[in-house]
Amino acid sequence: ARSAGDVAAAIRFARRHRLRLVVKGGGHSYQGGSNAAGSLLVWTRQMRAITLHDAFVPTGSEAAPVPAVTVEAGALWGEVYREVCVRGGRYVQGGGYLTVGVAGLVQSGGFGSFSKAFGTAAASLLAAEIVTADSRVRTVNATQEPDLLFALKGGGGGTFGVVTRLTLATHDLPPTLGAVFAEVRASSPTAFRRLIAEMLTFYAENLLDPHWGEQIVLRPGNVLALSMSLQGLSQAAAERVWAPFWARLRAEPEAFRFPAEPTILAVPARSYWDPAFLRTLPGVVLGDDRPGAPPERIFWAGNREEAGQILHAYQSAWLGADLLAVERRDALADALFAASRQWSLSLHTNKGLAGSPASVESAAATAMNPAVRHAFALVICGAEGPPAYPGIPGHEPDVARARQDAARVRAAMAALKERIPTGGSYLAESDFFEPDWQQAFWGANHARLTEIKRRYDPDGMFTIHHGIQAAG
């Protein structure tokens, strides 16, 4: 598809021939929503124009003008960051992966590395162009069809129609963006339990704020791995924040060991997504190696193994900030330690709005589960294998291993949930077999979303796994 008109024609064709219709942008769908056997696929990749606005006012609105960017549905976040941040000197809230599609991320809620500072991508959505099941091209905003705009703010991609264009608010670009990388190895399970407690205390007292995001990972072998993001801090300021933590662990060399020196990097924000700059950093990005590919077509090196991978199991849950209270911190440490005895798990501290400033629009204005407003992190536990293809010798799925991995993931999450309360899950990164998905993904917003679905797609033309279904 190259236009909203093309999409409308595809919808009319699918309706006339009673075909299932599936929508694909970037294709990053853990639930498999961007493909289905026997379906007509509408792929929006050729629609990727990006336009910056100094003063945007939605159609029919009397709201004050705001800086914004309009992005067609096929654009990827790496392309948007280059246009908005590197060239335009502004910031737009998007995904952490450079190859994630814009439209799908916004419709799932949309966390990025700096969500504690800027909120979700869905909360930044000012207007959208969408082709609905009746093949009408609609422009929706807070004045025109506000319910449909609400549904697009986390109600699920490929559910309410085919989004062809979105306009998102932009923000002042921080002076710096950066990251912290470290690995700490504990000498015993007892030392690892203490390490988890030390990390939680340090996080609660120093990192639960808009400057920090991304991952705290607990790995087999009593390993704590840090892959944190930072914004708005100088290199020296970031080093000062972490110095007491490093010193505390180094004071017990018999219990804690650093295989390599921790790395802290803060760079001018306009360089953070600049392909020319990123290519100068060894091992950070990889490029498209196909003949004729432009040099700016890059992706994070750590994402390479995810292309085509087979998920053996995948579960997630919000962790409320109340678990970081002094009187509850030991219970959280016990739960994380117990889970780590079964499998590795990661705390995505940018996927939760606790610690955000009051100026960040709350998740209550989006369709996401309101539990995200009070969550300090999304805990993720998953297992995967390399790309596999049934019937192709040497590349067959390893079903036995997959079932073993899935059992370990279930055991890890069960150990966690037995010890502490968790609240809901994140639609974009969740269990394919989530039994209570309606409440997990949307909570109290589910009823409103089903009514919106009934109004705009009563016959269920747009059907995805664990997607909103029409009421009545």
Image (cartoon, rainbow, N blue to C red):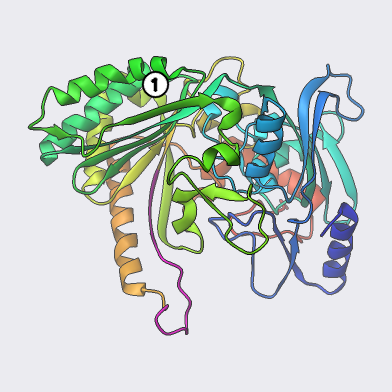
In the displayed structure, 331 sits above or below 204; it is below
Q: How many marks?
A: 1
Looking at the rendering, which quadrant does residue 87 occupy? top right
Q: Is 282 contained in the magenta span?
A: no
291 with respect to 398 (left or right): right
Residue at x-position 57% and y-position 26%: 269
In the displayed structure, 146 sits above or below 326; it is below
Residue 53 point in image, percent of width and height: 82, 28
For the record, the magenta segment spans 380-395
Looking at the rendering, which quadrant does residue 305 occupy? bottom left
Q: Is residue 366 visible?
A: no
Instruction: Give whichever of 173, 209 is nearer the camera.
Output: 173
In the displayed structure, 212 sits above or below 32; it is above
SS state under label 1: loop
Instruction: Give whichever of 379, 467 is nearer the camera.
Output: 379
* Residue tagged 1: 207
Residue 385 point in image, percent of width and height: 39, 64
Q: Label the magenta part by its dominant secondary structure.
A: loop
Q: Is residue 270 visible?
A: yes
308 with respect to 343 (left or right): right
The N terminus - image quarter: bottom right
In the displayed structure, 232 sits above or below 284; it is above
Residue at x-position 46% and y-position 19%: 209
Instruction: Give whichever of 237, 210 is nearer the camera.
Output: 237
Residue 67 point in image, percent of width and height: 77, 23
Residue 352 point in image, percent of width and height: 49, 31
The local crowd at label 1, few if under 14, some if 14 to 19, many if 20 or more residues have their Cα within 10 Å, is some
- The three-letter code of the residue at mark 1 reads Leu
136 with respect to 374 (left or right): right
